[in-house]
Amino acid sequence: MYADLSKGQCPSDNVEPRSATTVGSFNLLTNVTSSGKIFACPSDGRRTAKASFQPGDALTGSNLSYSYGGAGLKWQENPDTIIACDNDSNHRDGGNVLYADGRVEFLSSEKIRQLRWKQKPYPENQAQPTDLPPATTSMEGRSPVQELTALDVKGGFREYRLGMKKDEVRGDLTKQDSFTEDTEEYAVKGFDHALGAFQIDKIELEFDRRLAILKEVSVWVKGKQNVEGVLEAFKVAYGEPEKGGLGSDVYSWRGIDLELRYSVDVMFDKTATATWTSKKVDKLITDDRTRRAREGASDAAKGL
């Protein structure tokens, strides 16, 4: 079970529960199941069950029949907390509700409409289950202006998702020399260098030192064939990129939250670096630094 591998936490694709999304959170379950069929209700004629379910082959709103409210919650901590439920349109007379202790009940449609997610640590900002396509459903039941892109759903590179806690990273990490007052970098050791038919050379992770969250993922690629092959793989996964750059060819993919930049050395075209960043994570870090600066200024003012 996911919670057993995540210190009891329910899936959340964002460190800020109110910014978590239904599709992104369910896509974290690739480490506990390989079947996408369980995410589509057999009675939901608007969704198509997905046979395969694995990293790089993610769910979208068209494959998901359920609303979710588990971000920020711990599994079995409060047994009567609602984790997920059927969308209103799945059944005519009601729907199934999943509680935090694993039990499932079939309730009337009216009862489901009355439910509120018992969120922590934001119980005052409770949200109703919605019948919006899951790709646009957030923890507050709001519908973003744009659909989540494949880049947003993926959330990073392989298991390294922007915003994840440093202690959640599995495997060996080697400290790099490029530490600053606010950040620290690590190289991943013993990773799988194969990316399909191509090879990647290095993976580096940059964490915010005070919040201990992943703020940037960088992947190095060497060799002309690998550089070109990885670029084509990104195009297949995320569509055609924007192109620019001075001194290097820079290909960019932008989602609602995530951005991927692939920089190719134009002088030698045998090296490239792919870098993933998140606007939400950057804002979280900026807000934390601003808060600390204000607190420091307030303390200093007391001594004037």
Image (spheres, rainbow, N blue to C red):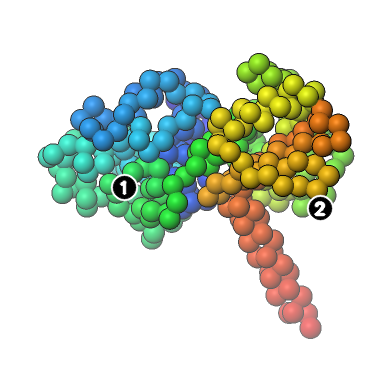
Vertical relation: 7 (above or below) 303? above
The residue indicated by pointer 2 is 181
Lower sequence index among marks 2 and 1: 1
Residue at the location (79% across, 83% down)?
304
Query: Do callouts 2 and 1 mark residues in contact (Cβ within 8 Å)?
Result: no
Residue 57 on image: x %, y %:
49, 26
Q: Is residue 210 visible?
A: yes
Closer mark to the observer between disc 2 and disc 1: 1
**Residue closest to the eye, 77 or 103:** 103
Residue 118 on image: x %, y %:
35, 50
Residue 84 on image: x %, y %:
33, 39
Mark 2 element type: loop
Q: Name which quarter of the figure residue 166 lies in.
A: top right
- In the rendered image, the residue lying farthest to the left is 93
Q: Is residue 288 visible?
A: no
Residues at marks 2 and 1, CA–CA distance in whole angstroms: 43 Å
Vertical relation: 99 (above or below) 284? above
**Residue closest to the eye, 31 or 59:** 59
The residue indicated by pointer 1 is 132
Mark 1 element type: loop
Q: Is residue 46 left or right of residue 247?
A: left
Q: Is residue 140 left or right of residue 128?
A: right
Vertical relation: 142 (above or below) 2? below
